[in-house]
Amino acid sequence: MNEFSLAHLTVLSLQPPEMVSVAARTGYQAVGLRLIAVTPDSPGYPLMDDAAAMRETKIRLDDTGLRVGDIEFVKITPEIDIAALEPFAAAGAELGARHVIAAPYDPDLGRLAERFAALADLAGRYNLSVLLEFFPWTVVPNLREAKRIVDAADRKNTGILVDTLHFARSESRLEDIAAIAPDRLPICAVWRTFHDGATAAYGSRRTLATGRRRDQHPRYSRAATDWSYDRAGGSHGKSHARMWPRGSRATRP
């Protein structure tokens, strides 16, 4: 059976406890929580600084049987203070998360790899891995460059998050996936647009679904995105999910 995790971006206005309840009602098995805001005008929910919200989130997780797949969003910038992220990592461990999602925003690639390694060392103390997500508009615009950073960091608890939207928009190729060890690709994101097949702008209301897959090389099947689309929003589709399949490809349950 495939396992899907609802990304916080889908319902970013919801506090984590409410998000867990929504995920449970709509058929997800896990959630990804945005504990650090990505932009000044978008919310983040720092459970590491809010004991009451942390307690309520854990109660909802226990009540629903859902788990936390990943926590986000660490932007690796020239100014980043890795040590200051320890409460964030500790919160992830308390929630039972598996992965930290990080993004490359330091133009010095050598320093970026060093900071990525330092983040992995911190995360490792809390039994977390760190996944680097590449974006075409950043200094790590494709899968090949992401692999170079991960290889340079040389930490066992690191990997790459492949988002099919960014994969398609970059110069990445399927051959690049084949060149990466499966344990470096623990999850992936799969996007779905409306029926007309038009390419949606990132973060737009036309974007329907994203999945993140676990334990396999990414195989981006139509069945996977159809399932996510049907369960998370239907024709209204404003969903952004994460898919964690146990099988070799995604199918409807």
Image (tube, grey):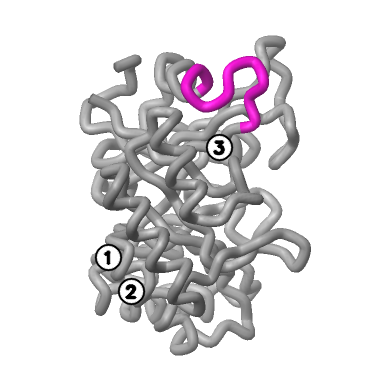
Q: Is residue 99 above or below residue 235?
A: below
Left or right: 230, with 92 as reference point: right
Q: Quadrant of residue 40?
A: bottom right
The reply to whether the C-beta atoms of the residues labelled 2 and 3 are less than 8 Å apart is no
Q: Which residue is mark 1?
A: 157
Work out whether 198 lies above or below 21: above
Q: Are marks 2 and 1 in contact (CB under 8 Å)?
A: yes
Which dot, 3 or 1, sits closer to the camera?
3
The residue that disc 3 covers is 240
Q: Where residue 88 sits: x, y (%)?
A: 44, 75
Question: Mark 2 or mark 1: which is in front?
Answer: 2
Residue at 63%, 65% (x, y): give it: 37
**Residue bounds of the magenta highlight:** 229-238
Pick the residue in front: 76 or 170: 76
Which percent across, then down, holds residue 242? 44, 39
**Which quadrant is the C terminus positioned in?**
top left
Q: Which mark is residue 233?
A: none
Q: Determine whether the residue tagged by mark 1 lies in a helix, strand or loop.
A: loop
The Cα–Cα distance between marks 2 and 3, rounded to whole angstroms, is 25 Å
Which of the marked residues, 2 or 3, is nearer the chain's N terminus?
2
Q: Kindly identify the amino acid type of the residue bearing the numbered disc 2.
A: Ala
Q: Is residue 230 above or below residue 26?
A: above
Q: Quadrant of the N terminus?
A: top left
Say which residue appears at 65% left-offset and 37% top-offset: 169
Amino acid at dot 1: Asn
Tell me residue 173's x, y (percent): 49, 34
Residue 176 shows up from this direction:
no
Q: Secondary structure at mark 2?
A: helix
**Residue occupied by mark 2:** 123
